[in-house]
Image (spheres, rainbow, N blue to C red):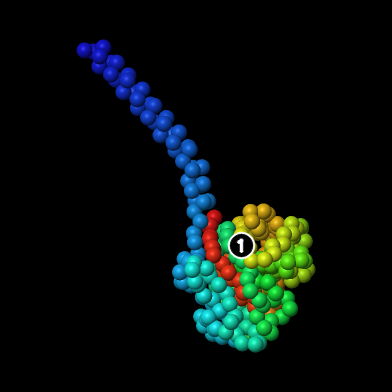
Amino acid sequence: MTRFMLVSSLCLLLMQSCGEKKAESQKEESNPFEQKTVLNNWRPLFNGTDLDGWTMKIFGHPLGENFGNTFRVSDGILSIRYDAYGDDFKNRFGALYFNEELADYRLKVEYRFVGETAPGAPDWGFRDSGVQFHSQSPASLKADQPFPVSLEYNLHGGNGTDERPVGAICANGMFVTLNGQQNTSYCTPPLVQRTFHGDQWVTMEIDVKDGKITHYVNGEEILSYSNPVYNPEHEIAKTLIVDGDSVVKNGYISLQSNSHPIDFRKIELLRY
């Protein structure tokens, strides 16, 4: 009986030890899994039904007024159109802003250019749009301010013949550091240049983390830069500098209405 109890106790100890080792092993393996789960937790920002969670601001119109039904949703697609603008676009540039302020994240957007540029639009408006980010809030835009202080992933569409690469960084009221130097022009072209002709769907991504920003198109890295700061000589940007700190750490994202019709069918966000 004593020998049986001794054997049983040893077996119980061995089982307990194995169980603890298995639990420790599972715990060690859980961290990479949890990290992978978090990093793949894409959140849709567009519900495919309406503009819930978004607010429009069009030059010359109050915040939230969707003049001419510029921003509309049909059949799961968010469209920007100008068919109610008449014969003159009248510089009514605008943007559709997501309502949350964002810091470190990865943004993925599927888009396509369609149709013809609105009558009276500037020449550069042809198949031109953009995704603005690190933007001032739409509520803070001045009445005579067509574009927010922001960074922009510029969207260009091809004309069927010429190269019109997508993904330039345009900085309105800000500076960024490219290859160790601060930008000297409003827009800086991507290092890897890709042009997309016709009405094909294209996937652009912006990765923002710890002050470094990277542009992608169809999964390919095309541009990287860092250290966005407000321009202290810009009339509006200088008002956004708090206690001498000009570093831009967060802001709003928005989809531009620049005068050429464009569609969006997927807008997703991954937070870091």
Report the quarter where the N terminus lies. Answer: top left
What x and y, as percent, mark residue 131?
A: 62, 68
In the image: residue 168, left or right of residue 135: right
Whether residue 2 is visible, yes or no, is yes
Say above or below: 90 vs 212.
Answer: below
Q: What residue type is labelled 1?
A: Trp
- Secondary-structure class at tag 1: loop
Q: Residue at x 43, y 34 (%)?
A: 24
User: What residue would you read off at disc 1?
Assistant: 201
Query: Within the image, what quadrant is residue 6 found in?
Result: top left
Say above or below: 31 vs 92.
Answer: above
Q: Which residue is drawn at 65% across and 87% down?
A: 87
What x and y, as percent, mark residue 9?
A: 29, 20
Q: Which of these two is toward me, 266 or 186?
A: 266
Report the quarter where the C terminus lies. Answer: bottom right
Q: Which of these two is toward me, 256 or 100?
A: 256
What x and y, as percent, mark residue 247?
A: 65, 66
In the image: residue 247, left or right of residue 138: right
